[in-house]
Amino acid sequence: MGTPPLADDLCIEAVRAVSLHRSKQDAAASLGIPRSTLRSRIRKAEERGIYADEPSFSVDPLTSEDVPTPDLLARKDRDWERKKQARSDRNLIHIKLNVDGPFGLMFFGDPHIDDDGCNWKLFREHTELIKENRDILFSVLAGDLTNNWIGRLNYKYGQQTITAKQSWQLVEWWLTELGESIMLGVMGNHDHWARGVQGSSPLEWFMANRTGVLEPYEVNASIDTPSGEAFTVNLRHNFKGSSIYNKALAGMVKQLRIKGWWPDIMLAGHIHISQFTQVLNPTTKRVTHLVRASGYKEIDDYADREEFADHSIFESAVLVCDPYEKDPRYRVRVYDPIHGVKVLKMMRSEWECDKSASTFIL
Ligand SMILES: [Fe+2]
């Protein structure tokens, strides 16, 4: 029995495929057949007088609204390079400090500035410390500046005296009070809620033209002092992880060991409890200072309802950094804000007497 004759359908299919694709190779691939088979079917089609359909009408050229693919590829190239560079820049942000001698970092815990339970009196006192010591004390923000109730939590605006609009008035006032003292900041979960459907936050807008750094999730920074000494800081709204033995700092210790980077200072807020400790890197003999500040939401009905015990020892902290300290264990000291500023001033007055070394003894 001989080979059955090729069906007309297969010839028509082959001719159409050739008319729709740029090359015979593409046409063959679209049909899932070898090129030789396609050639054979085209030859048969010609023998039988089967040709591709000729359109019986034409359309004037229309400009597409879509970005041409070559332009799209070029834009993607540029976007990726910029995104990659932006990430690379943030691996370790260098802050060139122009102030010599001991200086302080005022680490503000979550303010929740519009909450009726925010310890407003203390918050204002701590803000005054910045205004009075602007040249030697720099602000670091843990985030959660306001409540920003959204979604199912929106009803809580009915339970607080400050409206959403007024909350941004308070933020604008506070950031103006702090002025250019703001060196570092991260956004908290409540700040992210303000992004809404547009993806931008008023907080980012307020900070856009400032010298200081505001990042959405994390800051890794090196504060480079005129003495040549540098103080490295790792700041997040939260470091995930907990332990019944140490709720405040367990997540921070975990991240410290996972990352293998031992900054001089690790800072967090978020869970409204406070504690600090020091961990010695056994290899480098450098000390990492872990600080979680509780923030100012002192009266919290959510904590009452959930039976959260009060673990707030300090709302914010002042970290006194001494670039001239000879003993690496004492380069950074952690205090409550009021005493921290007193110690900082004493250390600076001693340093002013002998600028080659700080002799301050605790
Ligand atoms: Fe918070």
Image (cartoon, rainbow, N blue to C red):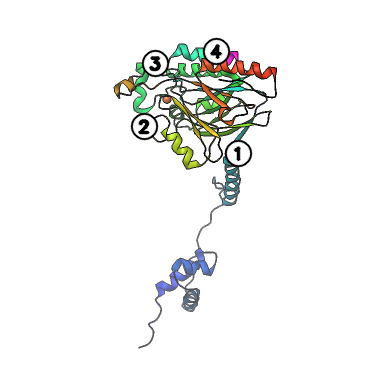
Queried whether the magenta region covers residue 133, the answer comes back as yes
Q: Is residue 218 shown above or below 343?
A: below
Q: Is residue 60 shown above or below 207?
A: below
For the point 45% across and 35% down, the residue is: 253
Cα gap from disc 3 to disc 2, whole angstroms: 28 Å
Along the line of sight, which residue is nearer the eye, 349 or 47? 349
For the point 70% across and 22% down, the residue is: 355
Q: Earlier in the sequence, mark 1 or mark 2?
A: 1
Q: Residue 197, how many percent across, how many down? A: 44, 32
Q: Earlier in the sequence, mark 3 or mark 1?
A: 1
- Span shown in magenta: 127-134
**Image mark for residue 68:** none
Q: Is residue 18 shown above or below 89?
A: below
Residue annotated with mark 3: 117
Q: Residues within 10 Å of mark 2 (few under 14, many from 20)?
A: few
**Is residue 201 at all visible to an observer of this figure?**
yes
Q: Nearer the viewer, mark 3 or mark 2?
A: 2
Q: Residue 342, how many percent across, how many down? A: 56, 14
Residue type beneath disc 4 = Glu
Residue type beneath disc 1 = Asp
Q: Nearer the viewer, mark 4 or mark 3?
A: 4
Q: Residues within 10 Å of mark 4 (few under 14, many from 20)?
A: some
Cα gap from disc 1 to disc 2, whole angstroms: 37 Å
